[in-house]
Amino acid sequence: MNVNLQNVNSIHKPRIFNNPERFVEGWYWVIPSKHLGVGKVKAVTILGRELAIYRGKDKRVVIVDAYCPHMGAHLAEGKVEGNELRCFFHHWKFDAQGFCVDIPCLDEPITVKLKTWPTAEKYGMIWVWTGEVPKQPLPFVLELENKECDVAFGDYFLMNCHPNAVMINPIDSQHFNTVHKLPSEIHFEKQELNQNAIVFSNTTSISRNSFFLRLIRRFGKNITHNICYWYGSTNIVTIGTDFRPVHIMFTVRLLEGGQSEGQVILISKKRQGIFGWLYNRVLLWLTKIVGKYFVQDDMKIVQTINFDLKTPIKADQSIMQFVNHLERQKPLMLKSWQLARSQNVEMKEPREKWQDTKSND
Ligand code: FES
Ligand SMILES: [Fe+2]
């Protein structure tokens, strides 16, 4: 089969994949929880939108649009009072739902509301939902759903490429041989969990003589290797044996100019007692080293690539499955966080037009 994807794309162009101005409605990382103490307020820019973030007396985090609805002062210059935020300019005060509850020069405040965004904390990170009401859960490790976890932060990174170039790396089966010099070919099978989550499981049968296989088998019988994607922008690589897998989360945001910023988070099931705690510290530290080892090889690519998947072949099938999954999600515009509408592609277009199987071989 010889399908020219460039021609296919000119009619059915992906709306979100590799688009420097669009992202998927979902949960995105903001700042580490420990960077926001009680009573503190900060300015953040997430996916091009300027926001103010504060933590009230009740320890809950509130995220609001940055500029005061009175005259536009930046609310991160304001002051947290209890669970509310007071603008520094004319001292209007807003509650955690954004309602104005005090205007010092009036007996009664007028009806005015500050835009607030759904917020949550998980894995030591503050997250924001980029729509009105969260429709799906925060990114989580499938194997550890509802379990207590220990986490360690890896590197924060800025990359000179679109987040999708970073995201697809762990399912780019060709590059395991060519970049990471791993001995066997890797095959993935996909399973869509919901509209915003997909998991790729490694189904490769590795040679019994493989050094890596023998090494991993020392720690348990069955080998686990899967990559779970949330909102096309956070992936969790799970690798190891069924008893002692490690989980590495790469959570990435699109920056203006089509670049990426991200954070690595290492996650492990919580273990009891001081020895359990120590065990996890060592495990997370080792995971960090393994993560760094792989990222180091990939660095040269993501810092110099002019990312454009023009000529997919059969070996890129998992990547194309990821693209199709991404394209079925709700596209928002950078900065405004409004629904992105395309002139030539309708929101409800049947996605079969950009099939997993369309490739050049
Ligand atoms: S600008 Fe905020 S109270 Fe006036
Ligand atoms: Fe890689």
Image: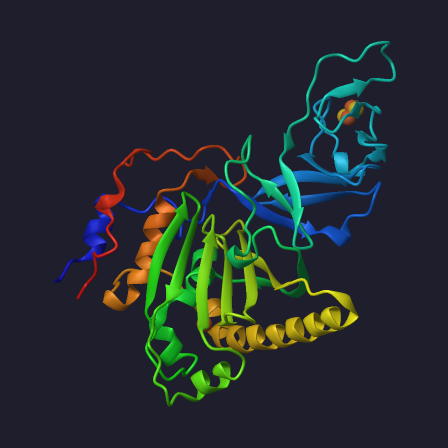
| 180 lies left or right of 96 | left
Q: Height in image: 109 above or below 114?
A: above
- Whole-percent x and y of residue 287? 60, 73
Q: Where is residue 31 drawn, in percent x and y? A: 68, 51
182 above or below 134? Answer: below
Q: Is residue 162 visible?
A: no
Q: Nearer the viewer, residue 285 or 246?
A: 246
In this rendering, does residue 354 appear at all?
yes
Instruction: Give residue 288's position: percent from left, percent from top.
Output: 62, 72
Q: Residue at x 71, y 13 (%)?
A: 111
Q: Residue 113 is drawn in which quadrant?
A: top right
Where, quadrant-wise, is the C terminus in this rendering? bottom left
Whether residue 213 is situated above or below residue 113 in the rendered picture: below
Residue under the point 25% across and 63% down? 311
Front residue of 359 and 46: 359
In the image, ligand 1 is in what quadrant? Answer: top right
Indicate how the structure is coloured in the image. rainbow
